[in-house]
């Protein structure tokens, strides 16, 4: 298999026909040995039935369907596990990322690059708030992490089979694939493009999921939040010690003890807030360690192309 395309799907019934057509046109220009893998992340619409029909009509199409919703990053990981191509393209099913760009990415890949990622020059159909949030996230992540994750890039990229092998050796359950690929290294480059608005339907990535992805990226590739918690602990300890000295001097030297509840409430609130923030940061890391230690399956496949063929 020369090239594979992995497409995570969640309620994309309005996008699947167009995605299939455009992806087939692009991949067939690259090689006759290609496959399109749709990963159904427990869609509630008719996405799965549409994918099944495509798989019946075209043997280049394969699919995986989860037993429940496991999330976008896990869906991408599953698609990579099931892929067979020497090169594998990762692209979302909402058509915001143009499949036609894969041809240019493949040309870069043939020059010897193991990873060719797509860098967004602009975002169409996105609110000012989201644009600011995205830009802020990537730059904060860049400052916090020990590795350099390319700015303004998502999971849309073309990777070599060797990258997939390394990804499969990473056991963590809270996936942040773009960070993992950056950590792996090898020769990497990019192509620029303008991101289109969603072709059809509503986004399956609300702000809460974006926030979780951001936390996964920071906790998975940076220890700076823990260092921040330690620093805050030291600062609060110094502050508390100075307050104690001031209170003792006021009481025994100037015979003017501290009065009123205002200063007490301010001190308790400040110290309590810092403690909660610190516990929260540590808790995020412990939670991820606990998830990894349990060693539950990353995902459960309810049905796929192979089981469909066996039933026949």
Image (spheres, helix red, strand yellow):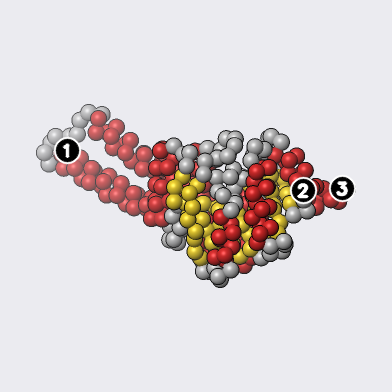
**Mark 2 / mark 3, whichever is N-terminal:** 2
Q: Which residue is mark 3?
A: 311
Percent across and percent down for residue 282 are: 46, 49
Query: How many neighbours does mark 3 have within 10 angstroms: few (below 14), some (14-19), or many (20 or more)?
Result: few
**Mark 3 / mark 1, whichever is N-terminal:** 1
Front of the two marks 2 and 1: 2
Between 242 and 211, which is closer to the camera in this rendering? 211
Percent across and percent down for residue 80 are: 65, 57
Does residue 200 sit above or below 86 in this rendering?
above
Q: Secondary structure at mark 1?
A: helix
Does residue 203 sit above or below 80 in this rendering?
above
The numbered disc on residue 55 is: 2
As drawn, the residue found furthest toward the top would be 260
Q: Is residue 219 visible?
A: no
**Mark 2 / mark 1, whichever is N-terminal:** 2
Front of the two marks 2 and 3: 2
Q: Are marks 3 and 1 in contact (CB under 8 Å)?
A: no
Q: Is residue 45 visible?
A: yes
- Say whether residue 295 is left or right of residue 301: left
Q: Secondary structure at mark 2?
A: helix
Q: Are marks 2 and 3 in contact (CB under 8 Å)?
A: no
As drawn, the residue found furthest toward the left would be 254
Between 129 and 74, which is closer to the camera in this rendering? 129
Q: Residue at x 77, y 48 (%)?
A: 55
Q: Which residue is mark 1?
A: 251
- Marks 3 and 1 sit apart, C-alpha to C-alpha, by 85 Å
């Amino acid at each position: 298999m020369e090239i594979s395309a992995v497409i995570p799907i969640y309620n994309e019934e309005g996008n699947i026909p167009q995605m299939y057509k455009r992806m087939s046109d692009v991949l067939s220009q690259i090689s006759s040995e290609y496959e399109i893998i749709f990963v159904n992340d427990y869609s509630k619409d008719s996405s799965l039935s549409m994918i099944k029909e495509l798989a019946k009509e075209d043997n280049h199409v394969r699919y995986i369907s989860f037993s429940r919703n496991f999330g976008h990053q896990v869906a991408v990981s599953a698609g990579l596990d099931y892929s067979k191509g020497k090169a594998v393209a990762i692209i979302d099913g909402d058509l915001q990322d143009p499949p036609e760009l894969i041809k240019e990415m493949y040309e870069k890949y043939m020059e010897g690059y193991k990873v060719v990622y797509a860098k967004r020059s602009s975002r169409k159909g996105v609110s000012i708030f989201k644009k600011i949030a995205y830009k802020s996230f990537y730059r904060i992540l860049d400052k916090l992490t020990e590795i350099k994750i390319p700015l303004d890039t998502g999971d849309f990229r073309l990777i070599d089979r060797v990258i997939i092998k390394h990804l499969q050796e990473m056991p963590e359950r809270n996936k942040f694939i773009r960070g993992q690929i950056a950590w792996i290294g090898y020769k990497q480059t990019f192509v620029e493009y303008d991101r289109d608005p969603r072709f059809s339907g509503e986004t399956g990535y609300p702000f809460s999921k974006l926030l979780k992805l951001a936390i996964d990226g920071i906790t998975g590739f940076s220890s700076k939040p823990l260092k921040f918690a330690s620093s805050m602990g030291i600062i609060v300890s110094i502050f508390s010690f100075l307050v104690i000295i001031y209170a003792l001097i006021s009481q025994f030297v100037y015979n003017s003890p501290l009065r009123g509840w205002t200063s007490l409430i301010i001190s308790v609130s400040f110290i309590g807030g810092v403690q909660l923030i610190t516990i929260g940061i540590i808790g995020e890391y412990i939670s991820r360690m606990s998830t990894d230690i349990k060693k539950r399956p990353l995902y459960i496949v309810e049905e796929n192309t192979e089981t469909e063929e066996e039933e026949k």
